[in-house]
Structure formats: C-alpha cells, structure tokens
Image: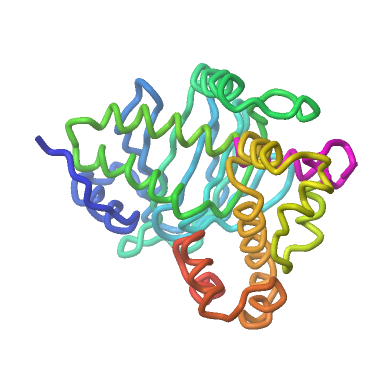
Amino acid sequence: MTTSTKPHSFASLASAHRQKVAPGQLVENRTVYASQLAELSVYDTYEQAERVRLDAGELLYCGMMTGRKVMHGMDGFSTGFLPHESFVVAPGEYVEIDFPEASMTTPTTCMTLEIPRETLLKVCDQLNTVSERPRALGEWEVETRQWHLSHTDATQQLLERIVASHVHKEDDCDLVLNFGVNELVARMLRQQGRDFLLRCVQQNPTQSGLTNAVAYIEENLAQPVDIDHLARIACMSRTKLFQQFKSSLGCSPAQYQQQRRLEHACKLIRSGQSITSTCYELGFSNPSHFSRRFHQQYGMSPREFAAR
C-alpha cells in the first residue's frame, strides 16, 4: 500500500516530479500522468521564452506550481500567472505564454487538467438536482471563457492532492483524480455562478430577493452582517435566506461577506494600499485578525501576497 495522507506543497511536488523525469525539451516539457478520467499533465520550462502557444481541446484547468508566467489571451488581455492561482482556458481556445524567469536552476512548472465535456455536464446535472438555484438565476452551467483567479487554500490543497497521488504513484490515484476533478468542477461552477450573480447585482440589484441581499452585503462589506435585517431586505425568512445562500453560493451570508472582504483586500493591496489601512477599511478588528483570515483563505499572509 503506497497511499499517503501527508500534505505536499506544489514546490516539493515539482521537485519530486523533476527528479523522476528527464527533460526532452527545454520549453514546456510535458509529462502526462493520467489520461482516462481527465488528462493530468505537468509542464516544465528550463529557459526563457515568449509567446509559446497552448491550445485547449477540452476545458483546460491550469495551476501554477513554481515560477512565473505571463498569459496572453485570445481577446488581447495579458496577465501574470503565479503559484496559488488558477487559469481556465475554454474548449477550442488558446493562450500564448511568456516565461520571463525560467532557467535550468529555477524552472517554471505548472500542472493542467484537461476535463472532458461529459464530466462538466455530469457535475452540472448533479448540482441542478441537489443544489437548485433560484429560478431567476437559471440552472447551473459552465461558462466557457478564459478565467484567471487567485483560488482558495482549499482549492490549492485539492490540486496538490491530485498531483501528489500521481507523482508518488499512490495505489488509489485514479480514485483521487476522479473524485478530485468532480470536486474541482463543482468549485469552479460555484465560483462562476457567484460571478454571474454579481453581474446580475450590478445590472439589476432588485431582480430577486437574493440579489437584493447580495447587493446590500456588497455595499456594506465593513459592517457586521445582521441576518434579521438581511432577511427583511430579501423578503425571506431566516431559514429561506440561508437556504438560498447555501444553494447558490455554497456558504452562509457571513461566510460570503468574509470571502468578498478578502477578495477586495487583494485588489487594494495590489493597488499599493498598505496592509494596515486595508485591514481597517474592510472592517477587520486588527491586523493580526486580518492576517489570520487572509492566510486561511489564500494560504499566505497579506505581506507575502504584497511581495509577489
């Protein structure tokens, strides 16, 4: 039995992977670890390069392991791509990639999961059965678009677990991949559903009771959530309010506010605002409390995030 529950970081996994795989090429040297349930690949690049094209036949979920890339999308946008971030390429689309820091001593490594459409549809069907959204928001479905985000520490641990099971050739690696991909797709769908809900809030906050409640939270991120007041705004009972947040967003109103506070904190810190002023502007009681919450969400401190 080779299964292990010991956690692995992407940096240590990339190192273990490279010890087993001799590079056949210096740019985007690809190793395929699994190809039945979903295609799991690890790419290593050992020299600087620009505009290396990556095509997606199916939906391609990318996670940075070590180093830095710059991703150029089909619609002309460019963005840096760092560890603890995800990048999704829609089926039939492509990205062009720069490797500004890759070298033989500090290679750039990322993992990808190519996820079949059948898997996406299956998870959508399951969510529509067990977690039906309010009628105004429609059914769960995958938005096929390029998408870049800083993911949560829970998503990071999920990706690390999938890669670790194959790099270390665990006995149950196929099961880990199967369950892991289903969970990853569900997480992606909920994130996309939340983004869609936020667009609805921006366009018409009075569209439904749920959009009313979300709009109020968005306008009052620094204030504690008053559930009774929120239920009155949404014209719902407390129980129905919690049910709608759980089915549409996968969390309680207070948890949603916490997530949005921290996402807004990322934007403020990236814009150059100090960590202390960000902390108090968003209603955290003190910098230590803010740092703990930030680390729980993103797996790093605000100071580490600012230094990236």
Dominant secondary structure of the magenta stretch? helix
- Magenta segment includes 203: yes
The structure residue drawn at horizontal position 68% and vertical position 79%, both measured from the top left corner, is 280
Q: Answer left or right for 4 relative to 152.
A: left
Quarter location, residue 271: bottom right
Tell me how the rendering is colored. rainbow
Identify the magenta region: 190-212
Quarter location, residue 28: top left
- Magenta segment includes 37: no
The structure residue drawn at horizontal position 53% and vertical position 51%, both measured from the top left corner, is 151
The structure residue drawn at horizontal position 77% and vertical position 46%, both measured from the top left corner, is 231
Of 286 and 60, nearer the camera is: 286
Tally the numbered discs: 0
Vertical placement of residue 47 versus 274, above or below: above
Q: Quadrant of the N terminus?
A: top left
Q: Answer left or right for 59 relative to 143.
A: left
Q: Position of residue 128 (x, y in %)?
A: 61, 21
Vertical placement of residue 97 versus 306, above or below: above
Q: Position of residue 71 (x, y in %)?
A: 59, 50
**Which residue ends up furthest to the left in the rendered image?**
1
Q: Position of residue 34 (x, y in %)?
A: 31, 28
Q: Answer left or right for 143 relative to 80.
A: right
Of 160 and 54, nearer the camera is: 160
Q: Does residue 174 appear in this view? A: yes
Q: Does residue 146 appear in this view? A: no
Q: Position of residue 113 (x, y in %)?
A: 44, 34
Vertical placement of residue 160 versus 54, above or below: below
Quarter location, residue 254: bottom right
